[in-house]
Every structure is written in structure tokens, then in C-alpha cells.
Amino acid sequence: MIHLAVAIAFLPYNTLVVAAGVAAVGCAAGVIGTFGVLRKRALVGDAAAHATLVGVACALLLTGQRDLAVLLVGGLLSAMVAIVLLVLIRKFTRTRDDAATAIVLSVSFGLGITLISGMVSRGIPGSGGLERFLLGHTASLTATDALLLGTVSVVGVLCIVVGLKEATMVAFDPDFAAAAGWPAATLDLVLIALIAVMVVVGLPAAGAVLVTALVVIPPAVARQWTERLVPMLVIAGAVGLLSALGGVVLSSLAVQVPTGPVVVLVATAFLILSILVAPCRGILWRTRSVSGLSSVSLTKTEVGAATPRVMERKL
Amino acid sequence: MTTLTANATLISWLDSIGPLHGWAIATAAIVSACCAIVGTPLVVRRMSLLGDAISHAVLPGLVVAVLLGAQPGGIGVLIGATVAAMVTVWFTRFLYRQAGLWEDASVGVSFTTLFAAGVLLVTLSGSRVDLDPGCVLYGILELVPFDTVDVYGWDIPRAFLSASFVLLIVSAGMWCTWRWQLFTAFDYDAAKAAGVPTVAVTMGLLVGVSLATVAGFVAVGAILVVAMLVVPAAAAERLVHRLHHAVWLAVVIAVVGAVGGYLLAWRLGTSAAGMMAVVLGVEYVIAILVAPDDGVVARLISKLVYLWRVQCEDRLASLWRAEESGQARHEDTFGGLVNRWLCVNGQVRKQENGLVLTPQGRLNAEVIVRSHRLWETWLGRHVDLPVDHLHPPAEWIEHHLGEQVRKRIENELGNEDVDPHGSVIPREKK
């Protein structure tokens, strides 16, 4: 930890900006992603990320200016449309959930590529290389971008803190929430929208795959350490933050190393470590005290029951 | 005249496509057929996202294979990608089983990790791997015809050859293991209990998916391969119920999507890979609209048919009641579609003083009124409802009671032949 702090303190200004921006996204994505993962919607963020391309292309086409804020608004709108479509497909057809996610993801991405490629071949100014929007360019993050990322992250986390009770309710038992008189469907949509906002805002900084990883991996790590919601949120936020910082520092050590993939790999390293050593659930723990009562071996049937156990938190 | 011109335009247009586009279209069609064949069991077994994961995760396999000296587009690359796909599957299973993660989260973790490793490898290996990220993500279908190999004096594109090879393997594999695939897809546990090597069957399917993915890589890129794997299968399984029908239909949908997408993209001057996904998406939307059992159109039609039947039956019943009470026709006008339909149908006849029931119509009307009054009587006896509240439920259920139910209600009521309002319940007639 101290090494990390020292390493950060001696980073050059540019890297510091990148570190701040990615760390903010990592932390907020971890917290908000926890609800996505608990709700078994881990990959909704991925679908939203790929759908932004359509909105980005439309925004450029309509306004004619390649301004990050304009593109982001366009991307956000199309991500929302994609999510609404996803919910509609799940509700009104018998297509399975996973297939619906894959369909929305790939078809909206295809539409985006088609639009951008058509714009390029018609020579519309600013459309060249627009499809690289999804790849992100972490290294060229500016101070303004970092500030935007920080603001959105803080607002996102605040939303969760303010609406913790409602979010918990909807995440664990939407039917009960609806029966108890909560506007469950709206709250659910708000939660998904939060994930979408987080993903879209993180895109230019981190790229689609990294953002998806930041939404999924930190909650997975946190799940290894605790059975309760609030500690899980805190751990997920911390893991997101640490893997972002660690990734930025590690990649700044070498010259030609892209930041995004390193952040993902650091987060996965955290996960593997947790799976091995986490108390009660860790593999090492389980093999050492085979006969001990303290070992909770997680069999296949218990995986399904894992979600309700986190729910034991008093509402 | 216009059709002639249109035909001439079409012919000259098709003529101008030429052999180069022909090769690209053929390659795309074969690739999409491969994807559809393996995609259908994948979708039915709720493993669509594994297709997404594999398509991202073959990247490190490709890079390592190329680093080890495999030729791009050759067998070595296919093997490398298959190994990477197996690693993904193993990692996903490990997370699901050992770490107690949710299914979709396991997939999310494993594919982002492998993709990140792949990107890192590409960057680190620098110029040694000639792998353009653009090619990986969007494919290079337009360039397929230019990379050819000489086969007995014919210049055949390399991608076409490898895609055909994959199609051969995939369809042969499906053909040989079909019964096992079918059994495993519908009931994994029963298949296992019956001695089907379910793990081997699943692994075989996933090897097929990774082969199809690698073939699709060249044509449409990593993400749009997902469209080819999942969308035709999802559309086909809305339209037919048997798995082998679904596979054939998915192949047709996929090939139409590939060819249509390529031609449209060429006409509009845009990316062929993207347009294929869009066409596939449109086909999916059409499929969910027209699906015979739960499609939007089918549901609308059955609703309309029901409403129409209710209208007709209500009209018949009201005519019958008017006849019973000895009134002259209160339905004086011969307007309205319902009356016309009943007239065409031979259930009512037009006379000077209005409409009258034909014998056939009278028989049908009696059944409706009988159901109505039986139900009112039954409700009046068993449910504590005031007499003026008995009509609305009976008005609804009269369209739904079958002969058996009427008989049972009648038996249950004994020899009651007057309803709570004092009207006579008509007898069942043959």
C-alpha cells in the first residue's frame, strides 16, 4: 500500500491525471456494478457500451461537431434506447435473457459500425476513426476529462448512498418490493440507467472491455470476502479504485504498455487471490480445514442460494 | 415497362458485382452458415453469452499462435484459437463452480481478462504480430478476394477455403453427434443419467463455436460474429419448434442476412460486416413479430378473432331473446359488419321487419343463452351475490363454456330449469 502511495506521488502530471480519472471510474463502477451483478445483469453494461456507437454517430451527424460532451450525450441516449429494447425483448418475447443481451449488443454495434462507415465513405468531416470510440484512449486523458469522470462518479455513488434502501430492495426481491408498494419497475430501470451512465462516461477513458471489467470484477472480488451488502459495496469500490491505480502505475513503468488491459489484469489478479485466500470461501481455507465447521464448501446447489444469503441484511 | 427497366437495372447491377464481390459474398455466406449451425444449440442451451466470450477470448490464442510461427488463416491459428476458447470455458466454469459467482458475471470476468491479455500481447509483441485491432473488431471481408491460394490452377481466396473447411467439420460434427446434442440441449441431467457423454458433447459444441468464430473473424470481426452466432438461432427458434428445423431455418436466415447485408452495404457504400448484423437484426424483429404461437401479429390476430366471435355470439343471443319475449325485431337496420357476416354465414335472414334467426342460427343462439342462464343459476345458488350482479360474469363466460361443462352444471343443478331472473333455461339440442 505504501509502495503504491509512493509510486503515485512520484508520477508525472499526465499519468496522475489518468490515474485520478480511471480511479474515479473504477471506484464508482465497482459500487454501482455490485447491484448489476447481484441483479444478474452483469453484461447489461457491456451491451450499453456497444450500443453507444449508434448515438455517437447520430450526434456527429446531427450537430456536425466532434465534441466529447455532445458525443457522450448521443451515446448515452442510444445506450438507454438499447436498454429499453432489451427490457422489452425480455418482457414480450420468449427469447432467453442471455440471447437478448447478445442480440442487442451485436446488432446495435453493427448498426453503429454501418452508420460510421457510411459517414466515412461520404466524407463527413470528423467521422474518421470514430469507431475507435469504443476502444478508449486512456493515456490521452486530459484534466477536463478526469474532472468530468470524477464528477459523474461522485454523483453516481451519492445516488446509491441516498437510495441504498430502495436499491437493496429492488436488487434482491423486485416482486416483494412491488408488492410492498415501491415503484419497483421504475427503480429497476433507474439502477440499470445508472450502470449505463457509468459505462458510457467511462468509455472514452477506458474503452468498452475495460469498463465492462470494472463493472463486473470488483463486485466479484467483494463477493468472496463478505456476505453482507454494505461491506460488499465498500470492498467493491476499494478494489475498483486499487486496481485502477495499480494498473496505471504498472503500465507507466514500461513505455509501450496500454493502460486499459493492465487495469483489467490487475483486477483479475485481485479476484484470483481472493478466490484462493478469502476466509470461509477461499479454496486454500477449504482444503486446510476439511472437517472444520468453519469451512463452508460451496457446492453447485449453494451457488444459486448465494444471493439470498447476502439478503440477510436487515432492511 | 417499369418492371422491365427494374429488371434491366437489377441485371446490370448484379453483373457489375463481378467475381471479386462474388468471392466475398460466398465467404460471408459460408461463415454465417457455420455460425448458425453451432449457434442454434448454443442459444437453446442458454449459452449465448459464452459465444460472446469466446469471440473476444480467441484473440490471445490467435496472437500466441502467430508468435509461435503459425500462418494467418492457416490450421495453426485455428488450433490456437480453439485452445484459447477452451481456456475461456474452463475459466468461466472455474469461476462459476469454485468462486460461487453468478453465471453472467463469470462470463464477464473471463472474457474481459482474456481479451485484455490478448490486447497486451498484441502491443508487447509489436511488429512481430501483424494483427490490426481494426481487423479483429470489424473484419476485412472486402479484402478477402485478394488473398488467394493456387488450387489446381484456380485462384481461390484463402478465407473461403478455411471457411469451407470449417463448414465441413462443423456440419459433419453436428451430423454425427446430433442425437446427443438434441438430448443434452433439452435435458442435460436426463441425458447424463442416460449415459450420454454430456461433457464431451458440450466441449464438442464449444470447439465448433470457436472454429466458426475464427472463420468469422476474418469476415466480420469479433463482435459481429456474436450477431451471426446468436441472432439467426434466436429468430429461428421463435418460428419453428423442432431443433433440426431451427438449425436449417437459422442457416437460411443467416445466409440471407449475409448476402443481403453485403449487397446493401455495397449499394449504400458502408461496412459489409455492420450491415450484415443490421439485416440479421431486422430478420429477428420480423421473426418475433410473425412468430406463429407468441408473435405480436399472431397474438393480435387471435385477440381480434376472439373479439369478433364474442360480437357475433352476443348478436345471435340478443336476437334469440327478442324472439323469446315475442318482440318484433329491435334490430331494425341491416347495417353493421356483424349482421352482414351472420347473414353470409347463414345464421340470420333478412326480412321486411328486420332480422330473423335461421334454424342453424337459432341452435347456436340457444347454446349461448343456455350457457348464460346455467351460469347465472349456478352462481345464484353457490355464490352470495345479489341477483342484479349475476349478469356480468355470465355475459363473459357464456362464450367459454363447452358442452361437457354445461352438462355437469345441469346435473349439479338437478331439475332446475328457470334462472334467477325467472327466464327458462333452454334445453340442450343435438
Image (cartoon, rainbow, N blue to C red):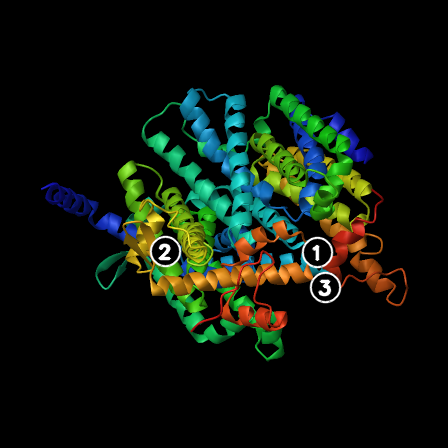
What chain letter is assigned to the residue under label 2? B
Position above or below: B428 against B394? below
What chain letter is assigned to the residue under label 1? B
Q: Is residue A139 left or right of residue A127?
A: right
- Given contact means CB atoms under 8 Å apart, are the residues at marks 1 and 3 in contact? no
- Closer to the observer: label 1 or label 2? 1
What chain letter is assigned to the residue under label 3? A
Q: Is residue B377 left or right of residue A160?
A: left
At label 3, counting other C-alpha atoms closer than 10 Å, the crowd grade (few under 14, some 14-19, many 20 or more) is few
Q: Report the residue marked by disc 3.
A: A300
Q: Report the residue marked by disc 2.
A: B253
Residue B317: % across, % down: 44, 56
Which quarter of the rendered picture does the C terminus of chain A lie within? top right
Position above or below: A224 against A155? below
Residue type highlighted by circle 3: Lys
Residue type highlighted by circle 2: Ile
Name the residue at 76% across, 48% down.
Answer: A223
